[in-house]
Image: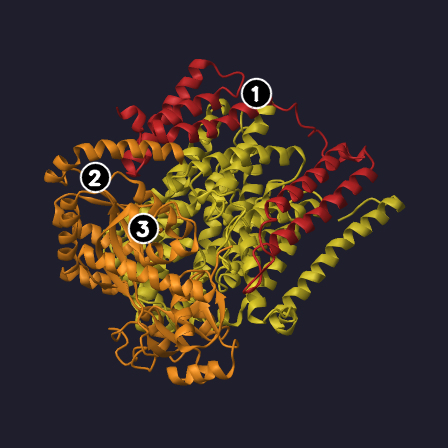
Chain colours: A red, B yellow, C orange
Amino acid sequence: MLKRDFAGGLTLLAFAGVYALAASNLSMTSSLGIGSGLFPMMLAGLLVLFGVAMTVQALRADPSSEEEEHPGEAGGPVPLRGILLVAAAPLIFALIVVPLGLAPALGVSVFAAALANRTTTLVGALGVSLAMVLFCLALFRWMLGLPLQMFGPLLAF
Amino acid sequence: MEILAGLGIGFNAVFSFENLLYCLVGAILGTAIGVLPGIGATATIALLLPITFALDPLPALIMLAGIYYGSQYGGSTTAILVRIPGEGSSVVTAIDGYKMAQKGRAGPALATAALGSLFAGTVATFLIALFALPLSHLALRFGAAEYFALIVLGLVASSTLAHGPVLKSLAMIIVGIMLSMVGTDLYTGSHRLTFGYMALADGISFVVISVGLFGIGEIIRNLENTTQQDLTTTRVKGLFPTLRDFRLMTPSILRGTAIGSFLGLLPGAGATLSSFASYSAEKRFAKGPVKVGDGAIEGVAGPESANNAAAQTSFIPMLTLGLPANPVMALMIGALIIQGIRPGPTVISSNPELFWGLVASMWIGNIFLVILNLPLIGLWVRLLLIPYRYLFPAIIAFCMVGVYAVSLSTVEVVLVSFFGLMGYALMRLRFEPAPLLMGFVLGPLLEEQFRRALIISRGDPLIFIERPISAGLLGCSLLALVLMALPGLRKKRNVVFQEPESI
Amino acid sequence: MIVRRTFLGLAAAACILTGAAAAQEWPSKPITLVVPFAPGGATDVSARILADQLSKELGQSVVVENRTGAAGNIGVAYGAAAAPDGYTLLYATMGTMTTNPHLYETDFDVMEDLVPISKTFEVDHVLVVRPSLGVDTLEELIALAKEKPEELSYGSAGIGSSVQMFAVMLEMMADIEMRQVPYKGSAEARVAVVSGEVDMVMDSPPSALPHIESGELVAIAVTNSRRNRTLPDVPTMQEAGLEGYEAAAWGALMAPAGTPDEVIQKVSEATQAALANEEVINRYHDSGLDPVSSSPEELRDLIIADTKRWGEIVEAAGIRVE
């Protein structure tokens, strides 16, 4: 059995399932014939087929072939800290960009992202985030004159 | 020669110090913005377009051409350096280009992209000059059924896009199409899979998916490895292609130019397919020592040439029928309309200086791009020498600001995070993002043409095989599928007979 | 969104308190003109032409800001929720003001959240058919459609587009039934008629003109009550025998509800002056639009009338967004 492909097949099945559920309220027919739901459902069905095929293939495969396929590319341990902080950065940005403005949003989120790397010091992270704020300010606000608020309404008072 | 006189008219109209200066400024601005990850060519042009409104017609057009090439090339640069394609046409560039950059060959990759584009653009310009009129009606032979069949063929042929088994890349193409269904359904107006978010009513933007799957996903994967912290471990090996590189890329550029020139004549689907189609061709025909997909120069040269040739020949359907190949070209039509020039069958004869001026300015934009960027390659390559622990937060920063600046939507920024996680999960499971993005780009066209064909035939599916072009294309797809399944069968036999595989 | 609205609400409240005094010296800082469509399109271009001229008339720069998405609904919602201090104005269209509310659940109520300032442009459509259909007049077309119910097809530029609405209106008033084939935009729909994939489309006159001249399309009638400047030989629907058919898409300047009357009056006058400017008129014509201004009251009546009319058509034709 190939563990990775087995997991991959199951992931496809799960995605197809969730997708079909989300698309289940769309109608299959319309006044123009095919409705908006038919294509999504067909695709979900097709993906189920692929998912099943992959899972079955993985179960029957010879496990030793996994290493052969990608020698020396086993993949390190999952970088939990990295995932958490990198994924959090856009969320932080989205959360504070409207009330507080672009500058603080960018500063805080880049600071968090920089810390995703264990070897980065606090000073280093601070440096990167400050540099990015200044750079983006110069580029988007002063050079391009985009309607981006540097400091949001909460900081304006 | 009489036909080539048209080109002369164009160059006469365009060549002035002032016009060339506008073109240069456009190329510089386009490159500067387009190179930022998180801002694709379309967004770059949307951001910079208002600058051209203050100008006279011809300078505006030529500046737009400069911006177009600058942003396009800027997007390829991002794809090669940090593996974040800015739009559909640079997805495949990101595969081999990035691998080349990792091997210390970012310089040759960047130079190849620029030179391939220039060659393709030049050839396509002459093709337009020679055949614009006879070719102007090719697009009319393609109805909904034909476009549907063309996209199917493109998808099938390109399922070899990834490294792994065909099954995996087909699955990724389907996931990509599924994601592309999000948004307003053209036929019923209903909002599909938007979960009530208005920001999703126009679908997920390409840049969000690309930045998440490729960019953020790759960043997380690089964080796996605590010892190797820089993008390139090897030293930079030369900035320009070697003689051997030129020998390798020449046939690829020729193939790419031919494929792109033809597909560019079919607006919409054709131009979008060009870089994917050329990449599949390279997979099959490239004979270099490095396999396409592992950082082969052919994998950069072919698609970049195809893409540019298509952009150039797509002027024919754009100016005679008003059908733009991509959003950028749509803006160019807009620029023409502002001057009171309407696309139509007689536009070439009634407005020769504008038609040829546009063709010439695109070509000049291309030249400027090469002049501007060849010296810059050293600078781009040096960017990779920044320690990765400082580079990756900067990439994330640009992605976030870029996505937000263009859409002003926080939902899209949140999605970057979502697709980043998805991208990393896919990498762990050894699914490749390139076929997913291809499905995402072509999915809406596939559905749209399929449903339109059925509306026109009143639900009769025979329309796809009754029309000769459509039937032919679908037949080819079927053949391709069978041929693809064959090596798999053969391989199994080989294993049984313990024969070494020899290709 | 909720957070943003709260803040905007707070800001709005603050502005109302100081509004009366501020209106005296308005405009004292740059004005933002929200355009709900992407840069480069006809709506955006006309907004920018107007903004240029308004800057001159008002002595303050008027800056276009594109807030795009969801058939214009995102931009309109943004404009409607902006502080009503006269520094945010909205460039709306017939579709966003009068048909979208019937088709989509929107975050705004046109009558309650917005106040009219002035109409800005009008654009009529021309009904064109493929030459191989063999009809030259509206009468022949209607006869053919009656002879073959649900056989003729018309291209549309999507649900709720003026291209579709004007065709549905034709179906209803002529008592015929045809099939709709939606396309991504009017350019695609036009090419489909040229190539013979569909039978007809309601197109914008300057875009259709080159194809009419070359014989690739046959012009049947224009939708407005007067003939089109670029197609003087093509009859109006009424002249062609369809009594009461009169339709034109339009653009208009709106402001968030609560904007001081003095400001509305000032902008309205400045707009009327701007749209009477020779250069502005020429640039509008070049982009295929007729510059038309109006008083705030006339615009209000127009919105009410069109909302009612398209509502009836949407309902009667059973156009529904599931």
Q: Nearer the viewer, residue C32 or C111?
A: C111
Q: Which residue was labeled with disc 2? A: C85
Task: For the N terminus of chain B, give its image quadrant.
Answer: bottom left
Q: Depth check: B260 or B237 in front?
A: B260
Mark found first going from the N terminus, 2 or 3: 2
In the rendered image, residue C78, in percent from the top left (x then y), is placed at 33, 43
Q: Is residue B243 left or right of residue B351?
A: right
Q: Given the image, on which type of amino acid does mark 2 rest?
A: Asp
Tell which subunit mark 1 falls on: A
Q: Residue at x 19, y 54 (%)?
A: C296
Between the C-alphas of marks 2 and 1, the distance is 47 Å
Give amino acid for label 3.
Val
Measured from the top left, where is residue B98 in percent x and y?
A: 55, 38
Disc 2 sits on a residue from what chain? C
> Counting other residues with Cα less than 10 Å from the Cα at mark 3, is it few (<14), some (14-19), or many (20 or more)?
many
Identify the residue at image location x=70%, y=28%: A74
Residue B168 x/y as whole percent: 69, 44
Most extreme residue toward the right is B497
Give above or below for B87 relative to C217.
Answer: above
Q: Disc 2 to disc 3, how far (Cα)?
A: 18 Å
Q: Which residue is mark 1?
A: A81
Q: Chain of mark 3?
A: C
Q: Crowding at label 2, few (<14), some or many (≥20) Cα neighbours within 10 Å? A: many
Residue where numbered disc 3 is placed: C110
Report the Cα–Cα distance between label 3 and label 1: 48 Å
Judged by depth in the image, the label closer to the viewer, 2 or 3, is 3
